[in-house]
Amino acid sequence: MSEPPGPIEPIDPSRPGTLVQDDPWQALRRHTAARIALGRVGASLPTAEVLRFGLAHAQARDAVLRPLDADALQGELEGDGWRVLRAHSAAPGRHEYLLRPDLGRRLREADRARLGAEPAAAELALVVADGLSSSAVQQHVRPLLAEFRGRFDTDWARTPLVLVEQGRVAIGDDIGAALGARLAVVLIGERPGLSSPASLGVYLTFAPRPGRSDGERNCISNVRPEGLAYPEAAHKLAHLCRAALRRQLTGVDLKDDSDLLALPD
């Protein structure tokens, strides 16, 4: 009779001779959050990598479905000195928001009328919308706005900040038009990826009004400490705002050459 099998030795990817076969690109992993050089066990991925993928997928789903704590964010922004107005898109809830993108692009009629009765914005209308990652908005809006305010000169006392629930990028057109702003700046949670569930996007539109196309906007994406850092993003945003107001346009005709300004003389 054959001997019973002994205990199975645990897999240790750091030791040669284990079941996990390392990828020759292993040394490059420290430079990126992308899923490269995962190794393999036979024809399959190592169990640890499968579990990490499942965690990243769950974090991305949570980022989309977790509601924005708008009351807490409003209190924090007001504590930073911003004049915060509240608004809601035409999407009554998250379910409708995800199924009907068009509803997230426009304001509720009552909110449009209420914003239209506000004092006109001096130049900018700042819009903060939950988008597809409330986590990004909760984490990154305040530090980015603090950096931006120190880099851009405008009448901040007459610059409203509209906090929108269930909003998409184009809702800035409705808000900017209602407030009579020359330029709408929308800070919004971007669609989460499997390596970045909390990434913030910034969109600029000159002369905002309903019907503007995406080709008439400028975008700054991947704003987060692991991507585009707050000072860099604020530098780009301030430069694009000045250029947009000077040239009276945004979109494909307005190129981001802000990196040239950061070079030494």
Image (cartoon, rainbow, N blue to C red):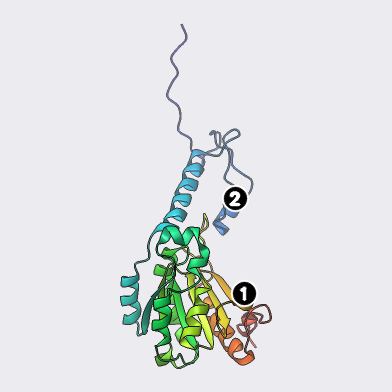
Crowding near pointer 1: few (<14 within 10 Å), some, many (20+)? few
Query: Which residue is drawn at the image coordinates 37% and 66% (left, top)?
Result: 68
How many circles with numbers are drawn on the protein? Answer: 2
In the picture of the structure, the residue carrying the numbered disc 1 is 213
Q: CA distance from mark 1 to mark 2?
A: 36 Å
> Does 82 appear above or below 22?
below
**Residue 236 falls in which quadrant of the image?**
bottom right
Towards the viewer: 45 or 140: 140
In the picture of the structure, the residue carrying the numbered disc 2 is 36
Q: Is residue 233 visible?
A: yes
Query: Which residue is drawn at the image coordinates 63% and 49% (left, top)?
Result: 25
Residue lying furthest right: 253
Query: Which residue is drawn at the image coordinates 43% and 88% (left, top)?
Result: 159
Quarter containing the C terminus? bottom right
Q: Is residue 231 visible?
A: no
User: Where in the figure is residue 138, as x and y percent of width and height?
Assistant: 39, 68
**Residue 6 falls in which quadrant of the image?**
top left
First reached walking from the N terminus: tag 1 or tag 2: 2
Judge left or right: residue 181 versus residue 135: right
Judge left or right: residue 81 versus residue 223: left
Crowding near pointer 2: few (<14 within 10 Å), some, many (20+)? few
Q: Amino acid at mark 1?
A: Ser
Tell me the SS state at disc 2.
loop
User: Where in the figure is residue 167, as x and y percent of width and height?
Assistant: 46, 69
Q: Amino acid at mark 2?
A: Ile
User: Where in the figure is residue 44, as x and y percent of width and height?
Assistant: 57, 36
Towards the viewer: 170 or 12: 170
Tell me the SS state at disc 1.
loop
